[in-house]
Image (cartoon, coloured by chain):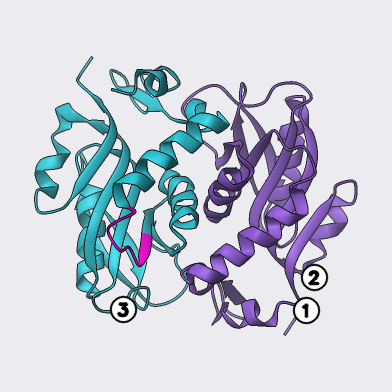
Chain colours: A purple, B cyan
């Protein structure tokens, strides 16, 4: 699926560490028609879901989230790494390979029962997306969908998101 | 100017440090019609400039840049803090209050003579925007315009950008 889009993604070997092949989306999103196609596909997946707000994850998720929020005609809420948001926040920890990190959202970002679309560039192990879904739910929001461009199937992140309506445009098996 | 939009921006006192009043745009961009109005205003300022690419600065700039690139029908290039881009980069240092930091762009992000629109959320001292303009120029691009939402007039960042076509939606004097 979407072989033309996949060809625009650059494989960067040994980044961020030896043995890992990084999927670099910068070569895709600098192509105006490919960027529009990505947003069109994501829009089609959520246009009937009565979305109230887009929640986008720092920082590549901001690029897609900004464009998709505009297309949907709704506002956008940033989820950021610890210490980056200026006002009162809620936070969720998630596991890294070694240790933990955490994500924050402003406490007053979401009203009760608002229908939230979560957007990021990539699903890997699912830690950040699951933490984000929890933040939305802790504030009383409803996770109406989770959309990403790329899914790394071999990391099985989708297993952490089984209760959500999840969609990825491009999937990769281990190379 | 734009008093209705200004009212949606939250003042956060003593962030990121004592004595500073931070202009928090998250309360504006979560309002769908205000977010659209911001993008409409920026679009009007650049729609006749024959823009080839949007260059957006990490990370709030990504939200505006993604939306504006979609609206213009062009691609988007991220400028990021050191070490965040996976492939070969060029970098520019800029001054902080104490010491320096640097911004990077992929070496192959821009072709010679492409017309580039630089987008960020805020102009403060102008260090990051000037460094970004230099990155564009070092790769052979033409800085066709620099657009931001907010300008802190008392920090005189515009003096660093005199040779560019600069526009801000909302301006603030020192409180």
- Residue farthest to the right? A163
In this rendering, position of residue B136 left or right of residue B5: left
Q: Element type at marker 3?
A: loop
Above or below, A65 relative to B82? above
The numbered disc on residue B111 is: 3
Instruction: Report the residue marked by disc 2.
Output: A153
- Tell me the residue at 70%/21% (across/down): A111
Q: Are marks 1 and 2 in contact (CB under 8 Å)?
A: yes
Chain letter for the residue marked with disc 2 in the picture = A
The numbered disc on residue A25 is: none
**C-alpha gap between disc 2 and disc 3:** 34 Å
- Tell me the residue at 63%/76% (across/down): A5
Magenta span: B47-54
Chain letter for the residue marked with disc 1 in the picture = A
Chain letter for the residue marked with disc 3 in the picture = B
**C-alpha gap between disc 1 and disc 2:** 6 Å
């Amino acid at each position: 699926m979407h072989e033309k889009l996949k060809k625009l993604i650059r494989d960067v070997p040994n980044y961020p560490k030896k043995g890992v092949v990084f999927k670099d989306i910068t070569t895709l999103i600098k192509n105006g028609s490919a960027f529009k196609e990505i947003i069109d596909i994501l829009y089609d997946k959520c246009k009937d879901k009565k979305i109230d707000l887009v929640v986008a994850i720092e920082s590549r998720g901001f690029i897609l989230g900004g464009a998709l929020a505009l297309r949907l005609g709704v506002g956008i809420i940033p989820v950021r790494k610890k210490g980056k948001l200026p006002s009162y926040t809620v936070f969720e920890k998630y596991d890294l390979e070694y240790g933990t990190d955490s994500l924050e959202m402003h406490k007053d970002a979401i009203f009760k029962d608002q229908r939230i679309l979560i957007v990021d560039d990539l699903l890997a192990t699912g830690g950040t997306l699951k933490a984000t879904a929890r933040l939305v739910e802790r504030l009383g929001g409803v996770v109406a969908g989770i959309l990403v461009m790329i899914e790394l199937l071999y990391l099985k992140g989708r297993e952490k998101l089984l209760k959500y309506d999840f969609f990825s445009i491009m999937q990769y098996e281990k190379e």
